[in-house]
Image: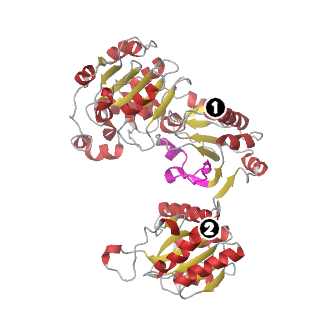
């Protein structure tokens, strides 16, 4: 029988999937779930060494001589401290020693519990990766544990190998009623030298295949052509947002398919690439979907901890798509495109979404557009932009700060190219000193939507349903700044303002003039909206495309 501790079951099951059978066990109590489980499993080749310091060196010698990874298992108290010298040796000699340290899960380090030592940090040169496993209580813990153990075991053997640390919290019950270990998926890793193109094409055949692109630097010609060719060969939609930089074939806005339409027409296999995405609808759209991740650095990234990550490709994106371009998938983009084409935009009040609908139609070709996080980005993601427009948003750190400074920096690369910003009042005022940068040129145009507070917090259905306007004073920071007119004009900016849809519609063509010298100065266009209209707009555009569902607004 095996231990009933789910996290220990995951460790043991994945050790078997990775073919790691050599194990050195030192006596103790908290590692009983491991010691007892492997005793009767003929897969494991188990050794007993009393002294943990000696066990670590023993494992290093065994790993060196056999060429195989070796697990060392110990209990709580100072046992794991005695591994350090042996793990240091393993680190510098790149020996695949897997330190599996156990401890009781139910106490904090500060509670004066006997034999409980803090293993959350250690020296840099005793491990290549440390996995602090949760004690599995729910599905989220289970997924986290699977991902961490996969990463630890891969790291121990990949790219030259080396020691890793897995800390295993255990139950004091020591229950052993499990007859079989769970079937835990091993995350397969590939690179350019280990790329089974024929087998991968076979896996994709007759499947609904999709590509998802998070924030991405501008595509070079080779990569863009490779992605487009693959998308067309497999009839694969390419889900993107306005941080993805993708201008190729089969584009589908993630926020339209997932946020407005909430389509049930989902892929069988999702190919994930790019960095952080600011479109939260992706986390619901792709939840549980089998995913192949392209990471040139070889790192595992389970987006939103929501997808079912099965493969990681440590190669260039161009190489990946070129190798698989000869395959074919089930017709998917064509059917999804029919659904997306039916998505409509209702009549909206003056709001961020309405403003984005007008700006998306008016912004000149070949412009730059930098958006503030959350509401500004989400609202623009409902609308297509011309492929010549370079779009970006600071979704890396995903903070409110720096939007204006980033836009000014972008505008310096080519002062003959128009550079637009779209952001809310809190983000504007947070970074308003950027207007005083003496390099600001006539190509800078800022559209600031002023609703007098952080309206995102009033669009969050969890907050709004509980507190409503009570969020205004501290959470949404209402009433701080007023208008930016005086500050903008004092910094030499031309100033425009609108408080109605008619005023906005009248000024938008002027604001978006393709003539860089149209104003003879940089521009701030301040548009005033209110909370009720912002809520109504988000409710309306969602309910309009989901008529059966009750309208609910929510930022995340």
Query: What residue is shown at x 31% (from left), y 39% (from top)?
Result: 458
Q: Which quadrant, please, contains the C terminus? A: top left
Q: Residues within 10 Å of mark 2 (few under 14, many from 20)?
A: many
Task: Please determine whether, in this image, residue 364 is positioned above or below residue 81.
Answer: above
Describe the element under mark 1 as helix, strand or loop: loop
Residue 277 lies left or right of residue 466; in this view the side is right
- Residue 400 is labelled as none
Q: Which residue is mark 2?
A: 94
Q: Which residue is mark 1?
A: 250
Instruction: Mark 2 or mark 1: name the one nearer the start of the chain.
Output: 2
Please provide percent x and percent y for residue 15: 63, 71
- Where does the magenta region start and end? 281-309
Residue 227 lies left or right of residue 77; in this view the side is right
C-alpha gap between disc 2 and disc 1: 45 Å
In depth, the one of 224 and 308 nearer the eye is 224
Query: What residue is shown at x 63% (from left), y 30% (from top)?
Result: 248
Residue 90: which quarter of the image? bottom right
Coloured how?
Answer: secondary structure
Residue 68: which quarter of the image? bottom right
Q: Residues within 10 Å of mark 1 (few under 14, many from 20)?
A: many
In depth, the one of 295 and 289 nearer the eye is 295
Describe the element under mark 2 as helix, strand or loop: loop
Task: Please determine whether, in this image, residue 297 is positioned above or below residue 133.
Answer: above
Please provide percent x and percent y for residue 500: 30, 18
Query: What residue is shown at x 57% (from left), y 79% (from top)?
Result: 56
Please provide percent x and percent y for residue 230: 70, 37
């Amino acid at each position: 029988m095996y231990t009933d501790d789910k996290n220990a079951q995951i460790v043991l099951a994945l050790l078997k999937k990775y073919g790691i059978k050599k194990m050195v066990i030192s006596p103790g109590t908290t590692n009983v779930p491991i010691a007892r489980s492997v005793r009767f499993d003929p897969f494991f080749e188990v050794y007993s060494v009393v002294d943990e310091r000696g066990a670590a060196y023993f494992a290093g010698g065994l790993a060196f001589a056999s060429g195989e990874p070796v697990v060392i298992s110990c209990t709580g108290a100072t046992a794991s401290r005695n591994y350090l010298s042996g793990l240091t040796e393993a680190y510098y000699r790149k020996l695949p020693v897997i330190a599996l340290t156990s401890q009781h899960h139910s106490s904090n380090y500060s509670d004066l519990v006997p034999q409980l030592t803090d293993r959350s940090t250690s020296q840099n040169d005793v491990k290549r990766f440390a996995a602090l496993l949760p004690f599995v209580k729910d599905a989220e813990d289970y997924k986290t544990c699977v991902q961490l153990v996969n990463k630890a075991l891969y790291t121990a053997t990949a790219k030259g190998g080396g020691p890793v640390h897995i800390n295993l919290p255990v139950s004091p019950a020591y229950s052993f009623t499990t007859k079989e270990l769970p079937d835990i998926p091993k995350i397969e890793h590939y690179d350019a030298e280990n790329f089974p193109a024929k087998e991968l094409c076979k896996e994709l055949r007759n499947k609904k295949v999709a590509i998802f692109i998070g924030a991405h630097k501008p595509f070079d010609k080779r990569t863009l052509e490779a992605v487009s060719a693959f998308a067309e060969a497999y009839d694969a939609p390419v889900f993107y947002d306005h941080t993805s930089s993708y201008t190729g074939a089969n584009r589908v806005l993630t926020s339209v398919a997932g946020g407005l339409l909430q389509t049930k027409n989902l892929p069988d296999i999702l190919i994930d690439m790019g960095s952080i995405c600011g479109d939260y609808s992706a986390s619901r759209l792709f939840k549980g979907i089998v995913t192949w991740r392209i990471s040139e650095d070889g790192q595992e990234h389970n987006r939103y901890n929501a997808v079912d990550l099965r493969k990681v490709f440590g190669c260039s994106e161009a190489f990946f798509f070129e190798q698989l371009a000869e395959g074919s998938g089930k017709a998917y983009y064509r059917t999804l495109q029919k659904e997306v084409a039916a998505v409509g935009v209702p009549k909206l009040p003056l709001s961020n979404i309405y403003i984005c609908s007008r700006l998306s139609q008016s912004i000149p070709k070949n412009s730059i557009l930098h958006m503030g996080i959350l509401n500004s980005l989400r609202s623009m993601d409902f609308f297509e932009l011309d492929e010549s427009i370079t779009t970006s948003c600071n979704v890396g750190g995903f903070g409110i700060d720096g939007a204006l400074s980033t836009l000014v920096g972008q505008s310096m690369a080519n002062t003959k190219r128009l550079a637009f910003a779209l952001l809310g009042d809190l983000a504007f005022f947070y970074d308003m000193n950027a207007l005083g940068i003496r390099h600001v040129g006539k190509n800078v145009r800022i559209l600031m939507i002023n609703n007098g507070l952080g309206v995102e917090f009033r669009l969050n259905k969890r907050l709004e349903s509980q507190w409503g306007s009570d969020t205004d004073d501290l959470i949404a920071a209402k009433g701080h700044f007023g208008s930016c007119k005086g500050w903008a004009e004092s910094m030499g900016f031309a100033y425009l303002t609108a408080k109605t849809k008619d005023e906005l519609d009248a000024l938008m063509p002027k604001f978006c003039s393709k003539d860089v010298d149209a104003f003879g100065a940089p521009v701030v266009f301040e548009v005033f909206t209110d909370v009720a209209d912002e809520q109504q707009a988000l409710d309306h555009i969602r309910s309009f495309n989901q008529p059966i569902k009750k309208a609910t607004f929510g930022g995340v």
